[in-house]
Image (tube, rainbow, N blue to C red):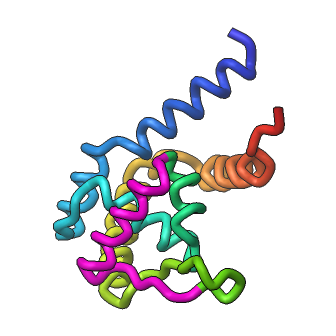
Amino acid sequence: MDWPDRLHRSLIAVADLVNRFDVDARLLAAAGVKLDRALFPLLARVAMNPDINVAEMANIVGRDHSTVSRQVIKLEELGLLVRRPDPDDSRSRRLVLSPQGQEIMARIAEIRRQWMEAHFRSWPPNDRDRLIELIEKMVGGAVPKF
């Protein structure tokens, strides 16, 4: 197997790990959060991308606009998200975490940090730093242009 195929296979394995519903369920349970697992990826994306709109969110999570729109409404009804006007487009709304959403994401982040620290404890700090640097470098220019 040549390096592009090995890299692709490795990236898919990482994406599979990150996107597993059972991993999300354990993370939510460990943080004491009761939330539909299908909503969690959206809440996490808003935490990472404040002021994202529904169309951008749908593109990132790989779901259609109408599905994401319905899920955003659920998160809003749960008091976890707030929609505010888009200053550049009066037809669009930007999404941000509510104070309750921020508190939940802070608890989840703490559990995730604990897991990462335990999982990568045996790695030398230089290896961890290099992994982060390489991933950041790759993601910076990774959208394919065919």
* In the image, residue 31 above or below residue 17: below
In the rendered image of this protein, does residue 15 appear above or below residue 73? above
Q: In which quarter of the view is residue 91 placed? A: bottom right
In the image: residue 100, left or right of residue 83: left
Q: Is 96 within the magenta?
A: no
Residue 73 at x, y = what percent?
A: 33, 72
In the visual, does 120 lie left or right of 8? left
Question: Percent position (x, y) of residue 57?
Answer: 53, 61
Task: Find residue 11 and report its horizontal and vertical position in percent.
Answer: 59, 34
Q: Position of residue 94 (x, y in %)?
A: 55, 79
Residue drawn at 33 percent across, 69 percent down: 108
> Residue lying farthest front?
91
Does any portion of residue 72 appear in the rendered image? yes
Quadrant of image for the C terminus: top right
**Whether residue 93 is situated above or below residue 27 in the rendered picture:** below
Report how many numbered discs are placed on residues in the image: 0
Q: Is residue 114 visible?
A: no
- The answer to which quarter of the image holds residue 142 is top right
Verify whether residue 83 appears in magenta.
yes
Task: Please state if 7 lies on the left or on the right of 20 as rendered.
Answer: right
Residue found at the very far top of the displayed protein: 1
Q: Where is 71 relative to 94, above or below?
A: above
Quadrant containing the N terminus is top right
Q: Residue at x 21, y 65 (%)?
A: 35
Residue drawn at (56%, 71%) of the image: 53
Which residues, given as a range, are shown in magenta? 63-85
- Residue at 34% in and 41% down: 20
Q: Camera-side residue: 18 or 72?
A: 72
